[in-house]
Image: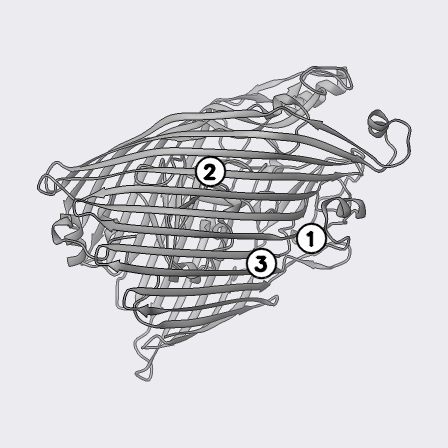
Amino acid sequence: VRPARRRAAAASPEAIDVVAHASRFGFDAQQHQAGSTTMLSEEALISHHVNTVMDLQKLVPNLTIQTESGSNAPSFYLRGIGLEDYTQNNMPSVMTYFDGVAYPLSPMSSGQMFDIATVGVDPGPVGFTHGMADTGGEVRIESRAPTRTLHYGASEDLATRDRSKTTLYVSGPITNSLQYRLAGQTVQGGAYRFNRVTGQSIGNANLGALRGRLAWQPDAKTDIDLIANWSMDESDATAGFILDDFSAVSHMPRDRNIYATGWSLNPAFAKLVGIAPHSIPSYDDVTWGITLKAARDLGWATLQTIGNFSQQQRHEYVDRDASAFRSGDSFFAGNSNVFSQEVSLKGRPVLDGRLEWIAGMYYNRARAFGANWFDMSDTAGYIRDSFHNQPQENFSQFATLDYHITHTVKFTFGLQHQSDTRSLVGDTVAQYYYLPSATKRAHCGADPAPCASANPFPTHGALTNQFSGKVGLSWQARPNLLLYADIARGVKPGGFTTNTTVANVQIQPFKPEWVLAYEVGFKSDFFRRRLRLNGALFWDDYHDKQMLGTLVIPGALGAYNPEGAPGTYGSYINIPHAQLWGTEVQIEANPVRGLTLSQSVGYLRGKYTDYQQVNSAAVAANFTRTGFYSPVYTNYDGADMGMPKLTLNGQVSYETRPVFRRYTLTFEGNYSYRDLQDSLQPRGSGVYVVPAYFLMGGSITLRPRNGHWFVTAYASNILNRHYIDVVPVAATTVLMGISGEPRFVGGRFGCDF
């Protein structure tokens, strides 16, 4: 929130230059700010069919966003830094912000991608001017603000497979100092996956969302902004296909059709988790939040505050073995809430405009309950529920100084301190036995009736108390050329493994990760601002990377070990050291009237330099030979980190001169290319590979010169490429792949007054 009035003396030389020489591409102020932020407009989001935060990877270099095993929880990787949050209870390495509010639980970032003004993606350590510190970067999403004059509009998007998206908004004044905006969206249909046995379709969307905003200016120096949002997602779940089945019971062959899947809900499982016995894999998620933002011009500084309370209830039934066998059916139940408050002061430039500063504090308190259910009746002979509570608090302080050494050279220093405390409380594993088995007899005796057992674990705590920092130098060499270099240290708190606890060693907290990031870059405009060329080179020293790994409890099968039952188990670990390096280039051109070209290039390499991990295959082979579990470690020093090495995104559009003096036609085409993605964990198995893929889209739009309405015909994935979007972690006995969208052909029409 910015004050309603500004004094002319507060404008920097760069800001004056931006106003005086506006470019054809927008986001001019960012061209005079150091850093490699990718800025996206609402038009870019619409033309690339960005409906969720996971779709942003179509537009941003070196960005990967993937679903966690078909759930609604996204995992972010930016420049190779990210957390595959299989247990969906830890802070992401790339933070998502909606209207200035940080979402430290990634599932809460879903459902609000409509009526958006801008999206900004910042790679590298963050948290020096607002919010929370993090290692990988942040995604900042800003919704459209209320307007001082009446505006209203609606749009409808209809496509093949009965997909539809309806968006409405109205915005205007209530009084001279009070404005409002209401917006809503509903998304329906679009299923393209099917049950390989029955042919039943799966994947239809059923999503609704609302947002309301009030902007109030009680006086010339004060702005207040109240934002409320709500969303409900009852869509079918993201279903996978079988890549490899390791089970001797089912031993399903690999699917030849990547849109094929399977499921079969156990009535006993349905009764335990509280869903209808005829349910197909689906979501039932409700998220809501209230934000209060305020800004007050104090003369010498601007006081800004952002307070928020958000809550989410999640109920997600996902079949993680993609088959009718009961070996990986899962149900996640969660109830989470986050309260946050940020207060900052942004000072007016002093020392003849040479020194600018901002300082502030941030606090959040999160309360999260989660229950992970697994139906393993056909393999292990029981249904398992692992549930826990996780309270968390974070208190951070930040300050950044910008000092203009000369009129064109600026030095930047940022410092951030955070204290993060979190606990794992009441972690318990309950098992329900319905069928005769050796496991049932061991826990329940000879009684043939269904029975249950429970194993609680003690409370554990984790504390992060660390500093982050940034030093940078920028040079406005010419009005159209900025050069910069910076070094930054970022920290992300540790956390816990919570999916299926069978041993106390699994829930020992993993450590914070930290990164030392180096970057040099430039921003430029040429040929009277008809060509924009931005580029950056980066190198990251990545320490204590958090990753889902494997641990071994030694001993013979069934033997006593105070640490737990002997065997191999999943648990988050810290990798001592890795290195990442690469480059990013973004080009925009307007060579002739009406023609606009854009291209982004991301190149990324990463390798582990200090990484010894349990070799699960070797442990299994040794157990087969000796009947004894013992850890076997493999040195993965020098192994590739698996991220796509090359990402390309491009767009071309041409707007004709007026047709019949009243209308324009816009022809648009876009493409994206993602290089091969190997396993994010070096398992030495090719089945984890996501092959490279190339996608194309295009559209034709007719609109009047006054812009009050439009009609668009479009197609996405025009070539109808069959590609794999993600290969998640194998939950139990089946390795799944999740297919990307096939070709969609549709039309959009709408009005805007």
Q: Of the residues tagged 1 and 2, which is closer to the observer? A: 2
Could you tell which of marks 1 and 2 lies nearer the N-terminus?
A: 1
Quadrant placement of the C terminus: bottom left
Could you tell which of marks 2 and 3 lies nearer the N-terminus?
A: 2
Give yes or no for contact between labels 2 and 3 (Cβ–Cβ under 8 Å).
no
Provide the residue designation for mark 2.
Answer: 365
Provide the residue designation for mark 1.
Answer: 260
Q: Position of residue 414 (x, y in %)?
A: 27, 33
Provide the residue designation for mark 3.
Answer: 742
Asked if 441 appears above or below 307 in the picture, the reply is above
Q: Residues within 10 Å of mark 3 (few under 14, many from 20)?
A: some
Residue 682 visible (yes or no):
no
Amino acid type shown at disc 3? Pro
Disc 1 element = strand
Asked if 313 appears above or below 491 in the picture, the reply is below
Q: Position of residue 126 (x, y in %)?
A: 35, 37
Give yes or no for contact between labels 3 and 1 (Cβ–Cβ under 8 Å).
no
